Amino acid sequence: MEIKQLQHAHGISFFLTGRIDSFTAPLFEKKLKESQQAGTYRFFINFKDVTFINSTALGMLIEILNTNQANKGNLYIYNIPANIMRIFRITKLNEVFPIYADADDVAEKLSIDLPVA
C-alpha cells in the first residue's frame, strides 16, 4: 500500500493506493496515530485507488474514528470504489463513517476547500 498525506488548514488528507490488510493496516495506523499525537484529529481519506480492505483495517479505522471524535474531530472517507463500498454496506459501517462521493462532495457538504493530490 502506498500512502500520501497532505496537511492543510482543515486537517490531513490521506491518499491511499493498493490493499489495506493485516500487513499494511499497521503502517497506516502508525501514520494516523502520529498525526493524532501531533494534535490533528480531522482526517480526510481518499479511497479512490484502494483495491482491498479487510476486517483488521476496518477495526483500525473505527478505533481512529472514535479517538478523533472524542477529540472533536472526525474521519471522512470519499471516492470509495464499488467493491469496497459493498463491504462498508454489508458491515453497516456506511452508517458509522461520514462517507462522501468525492472531494467536491466533501468540500460542498463541509463548506471547506479540500486539496487534491
Image (cartoon, grey):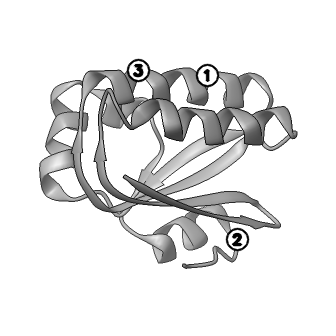
Q: Callout 1: 10 Å neighbours few (<14), some, many (20+)?
A: some
Report which quarter residue 73 is drawn in: top right
User: Disc 3 designates what residue?
Assistant: 59
At label 2, the amino acid type is Ile
Q: Nearer the viewer, mark 3 or mark 1?
A: 3
Label 3 vs label 1: CA separation?
11 Å
Relative horizontal placement of residue 54, taking residue 101 as reference (left or right): left
Q: Is residue 108 left or right of residue 112?
A: left
Q: Going by the image, does 41 lie left or right of 62?
A: right
SS for callout 2: loop
Judge whether 65 appears above or below 3 on screen.
Answer: above
**Residue 110 percent across, percent down from the top left:** 64, 62
| Residue type highlighted by circle 3 | Gly
Residue under the image location 36 percent in, 28 percent down:
58
* Tag 2 residue: 112
Please name the residue shown 51% across and 40% down the image.
Answer: 28
Q: Is residue 70 above or below residue 46?
A: above
What whole-number distance in Å separates the C-alpha atoms at marks 2 and 3? 28 Å
At mark 1, the secondary structure is: helix
Residue pictured at 49% horizontal, 72% vertical: 103
Going from N to C along the chain, the mark reached first, 2 or 1, is: 1
In what quadrant of the picture does the C terminus appear?
A: bottom right
In primary-sequence order, the first of circles 3 and 1 is 3
Q: Amino acid at mark 1?
A: Asn
Kindly check if marks 2 and 1 are in contact, taking CB atoms under 8 A apart as contact: no
Q: Hey, which residue is sitting farthest right in the picture?
A: 39
Q: Label 1 belongs to which residue? A: 66
Query: Dot 2, how many residues are within 10 Å of its Cα: few (below 14), some (14-19), or many (20+)?
Result: few
Q: Residues within 10 Å of mark 3 (few under 14, many from 20)?
A: few
Residue 54 percent location from the top left of the image: 24, 30
Q: Position of residue 104 (x, y in %)?
A: 49, 77
Height in image: 41 above or below 96? below
